[in-house]
Image (cartoon, rainbow, N blue to C red):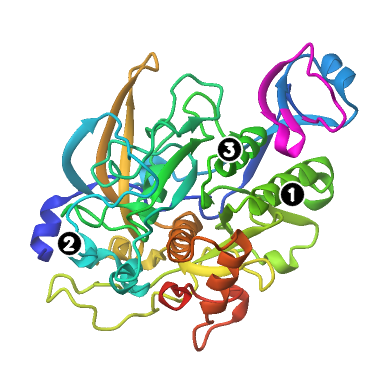
Amino acid sequence: MSSQDRRTFLKVSGAVLGGIAVGSTVTAATSTDRYIVDTTGVNALDGVDVIHALDAVDVAVVRGDESRVAALSERYEPDVSYQLDRPSDGTLQKQYESDSGTGGGGQANGKGQSGGSSTASATDEPLYPLQWDKQALDVPAVHDVTRGEGTRIAIVDSGVAAGHPDLQHAVNTTLSRNFTTDDYGAGAPYAGYHGTHVAGIAAANGRNGEGVVGTAPATEVVDCRVFSPTYAGAFFGDILAAIVYSANVDCDVANLSLGAYPIPREGFGGFYGKSLNRTMTYVNKEGTLLCIAAGNDSADLQHDGDFISLPNEGAQAVSVSATGPIGYRWDADGDGETLDLDDPPESPAGYTNYGTNAVDLGAPGGDYDLGAIGTGVPWYYDLVLSTFAEPQFTKSGKYLGAEYSYSWVAGTSMAAPQVAGAAALVRSQYPDLGADQVESRLKRAADVPDGYDKTYYGSGFLNILDAL
C-alpha cells in the first residue's frame, strides 16, 4: 500500500497508549459488600451470595453483610477494585478503518482454528508492512513451523470482539465468560477497545487477505472479561476467577494485560498476596502459562523498596517488558522504507517497567517520540498496529454493537500477547510440555540485544524461531 493510500484510509481516532497508561496512578476502592474468603475448612457458604466459588484454590468471592462473612471464616478481606488511569479521548490519534462496519459475534469451532486460505502467508495481509513487531519476530518464518494449531489462549481483559473480521475465526464464544456482575455477556468489546487490540496481537487471522496478522493466528481465543462499562476498574476477585477458569477450560496460555502499581508490599503481602499466589500456582500446575504485562510506569521493580506491581510480580507469572523502534517508516512520503532508526525494534520502550529479576522477557510493545508528534512525520508507526473495536451504547446503556477497525497502540499490554502467542506456538509444536517447560524454552531462546542492559529484558528479547 502506498503512503498516499494509507493517508486515504487514516482518520483521527484510535488509541495512542494502551494497557496501564504511561505515568499511571492507581486508585484502589475497597468494596463494602464484596469479600474474598479463604474457604479452607469451610463446609458451606450460608447466608451470603456466592459470586465466584473457586474450589480448586479454596477461595470464594461473596456478597453480603460482613457479619455473615465473618461467621463463615476468620480468613477474609474486602474485595478491591483497581481503577487505572488511561488516556483521555483527547489523546486518541490514528486508526485504519475496516469496511466491515458494526456487527455481532462469531465463533471458532474447535481448539485452534486456521481460518482463510491454506496457502496464504502473513506477508499477504495488507497491513503487514506496517507491523514492525511481526517483522522483528520473523513471524512468516515462524509460521512455516507452526501457526498455533490445537492451542487456546485466554484473554483476561475488557472484552474481545468476536465479530471483528480478523478475529471471527478465533474467538470461542461458547467458552467465553463475563466475570463481572453486569449483564452484557462476553465475546464483544463491552468495556472498550483494549481486549480486542490485545487479542489481535496474539491471534489475528493471517490468511483472510484483510488487516493484520497475529503471532499465533491458528490459536483459539477465550474472552474472559473482567472490566465492565458500568463501573470503573476491575475487581481483584473477578481476576482470580478468570485465571482459574482459564485453566479449567484447558487454555494453554492466559494473557493478562492489566495490573496495578504501586501497591504497598506490606499491605498486600498478606491475605491478598497468598490468594493470588495460590491461584497462579494452581493454574501453572494445570498447564496454563500466565503472560502478564510488566506495567508502564518507567519503574525499577527490582529496587522499588516497599512497593510491588501486581499481578506480574505474583508467583509463576511471565512478566513482559516492552520494546519498540523510533523512526519506523518515518520517510513514508518517499519510498516507504526506513533509512535510519533512532532506536531498533528491540530497544526498551521509554515507559516500560524493568528489573533484572522482576521481568522475564522483553517483547514488542511499541515506543514513541513525544517531540515528533505534530511535526508531520508518521510517529505512530512506532506503536503496535492491531485489531480495534469501539463499542456503541445508547444513553440508557443498551449495547448497539461495535465499529471495527485497526489502530496503533503502545504499552506493555501490547508486549504480553506477543509472548502469549509465542507460548501457544511452542505448545502447538510440543503439546506435551508443561507450563514451566514452555516458559523455560522461551527464556533459553531469548538473548539480551547487544548494547543493552539485561535489567530491561530478564532473559532477553523474545526469539520465537529459536524457541521452536
Q: Which residues are magenta?
A: 37-60
> Which residue in the structure is indicated by mark 3?
245
**Rendered location of residue 455, percent (x, y):** 63, 76
- Tag 3: amino acid: Tyr
- Left/right of residue 79 with respect to residue 442 in the rendered view: right
Q: Quadrant of the N terminus?
A: bottom left
Residue 449 lies, with reference to residue 130, above or below; the image says: below
Horizontal side, residue 167 vs residue 124: left or right = right
Q: Secondary structure at mark 3?
A: helix
Amino acid carrying label 2: it is: Ala
Quarter of the C terminus within the rendering: bottom left
Secondary structure of the residue carrying numbered label 1: helix
Can you see residue 376?
Answer: no
How many residues crowd mark 2 within 10 Å: few (<14), some (14–19), many (20+)? few
Residue at (55%, 27%) from the top-left corner?
Answer: 180
User: According to the image, label 2 marks what residue?
Assistant: 120
Name, please, the residue furthest toward the front.
432
From this view, report whether residue 447 is shown above or below residue 63: below
- Mark identifier at residue 277: 1
Which tag, 2 or 1, sits closer to the chain's start?
A: 2
Labels 3 & 2 near each other (Cβ < 8 A): no
Residue displayed at 58% across by 59% down: 294
Identify the element where label 2 is drawn: loop
Residue 410 at x, y = what percent? Answer: 42, 57
> Could you say which is closer to the camera, residue 375 or residue 167?
167
The residue positioned farthest toward the bottom in the image shown: 450
Whether residue 230 is visible here, answered yes or no, is: yes
